[in-house]
Image (cartoon, rainbow, N blue to C red):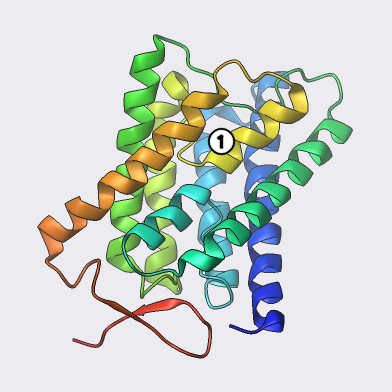
């Protein structure tokens, strides 16, 4: 991929992750202030914004919006390793900018919509691992190469995020996304449990790759070819 294409992809990832973190964490902050959004509303906010972003950005960057998803695509052989760090940096940069914006709008809120375990650490770690594994499995199943695009992909991925946030949000925060947890933790300087939300989603995304191979066969992951054009790894035509 040339420099112009890469810059467009990185800009899309930064803008998309900004929108995801801003909408989701702002919904949490507003709900904490008065309960008007409700837990169901927060879960739907995350799911709907991801659905919209996949429709808007899927054909540009793949709409990963999540370092764990980018790493999962790379482990599945669908994304070039040379672009992983650039994608992750763009995602984390967009997320931090979103949390700074939330902080500027709601300076009295001390958590900025961050994720924190409400029970034992091991409980939230295992839950985040399983949640991310489930999300990554769905993404691998509905995407083409490293691209999530179209109504079907958007509905599937956004629906899984909303569903998992509905039942797991009160326990672990249902992050499934290191950038989503990193940004509010750093900006509010509440980093005590941050390691959990960096390691568990990464492990969950990695776990989804062999699971996908078991369920969908070798064509799911690992049989890929780098193409020209977008510079991403696309599936081999079967």
153 in relation to 118, above or below = below
Residue 14 vs residue 152: left or right?
right
Query: In the picture, residue 139 is in which quadrant?
Result: bottom left
Residue on which disc 1 sits: 42
187 in relation to 82, above or below = above
Outermost residue to the front: 82
Query: In the picture, residue 114 is in which quadrant?
Result: top right
Residue 141 lies, in percent from the top left, at: 27, 64
Outermost residue to the top: 120
> Which corner quadrant holds the N terminus?
bottom right
Residue 133 lies, in percent from the top left, at: 31, 44
Q: Can residue 143 be seen in the rendering of this structure?
A: yes
Q: Residue at x 41, y 41 (%)?
A: 202
Residue 62 lies, in percent from the top left, at: 51, 69
Looking at this view, is 5 or 166 the one in front?
Answer: 5
Q: Residue at x 52, y 28 (%)?
A: 39
Q: Residue at x 66, y 47 (%)?
A: 92
């Amino acid at each position: 991929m040339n420099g112009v294409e890469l810059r467009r992809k990185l800009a899309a990832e930064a803008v998309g992750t900004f929108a995801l973190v801003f909408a989701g964490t702002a919904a949490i902050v507003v709900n904490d202030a008065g309960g008007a959004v409700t837990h169901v509303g927060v879960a739907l906010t995350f799911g709907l914004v991801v659905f919209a972003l996949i429709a808007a950005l899927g054909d540009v960057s793949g709409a990963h919006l999540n370092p764990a998803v980018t790493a999962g695509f790379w482990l599945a052989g669908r994304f070039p390793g040379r672009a992983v760090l650039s994608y992750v940096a763009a995602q984390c940069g967009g997320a931090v900018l979103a949390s700074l914006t939330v902080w500027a709008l709601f300076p009295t809120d001390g958590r900025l919509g961050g994720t924190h375990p409400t029970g034992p650490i091991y409980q939230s770690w295992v839950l985040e691992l399983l949640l991310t594994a489930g999300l990554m499995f769905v993404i691998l199943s509905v995407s083409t190469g490293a691209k999530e695009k179209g109504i079907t992909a958007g509905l599937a991925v956004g629906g899984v995020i909303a569903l998992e946030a509905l039942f797991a949000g009160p326990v672990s925060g249902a992050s499934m996304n290191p950038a989503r947890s990193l940004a509010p933790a750093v900006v509010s300087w509440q980093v005590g449990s941050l390691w959990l939300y960096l390691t568990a989603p990464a492990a969950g995304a990695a776990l989804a790759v062999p699971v996908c191979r078991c369920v969908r066969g070798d064509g799911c992951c690992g049989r890929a070819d780098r193409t020209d054009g977008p510079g991403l790894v696309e599936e081999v035509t079967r």
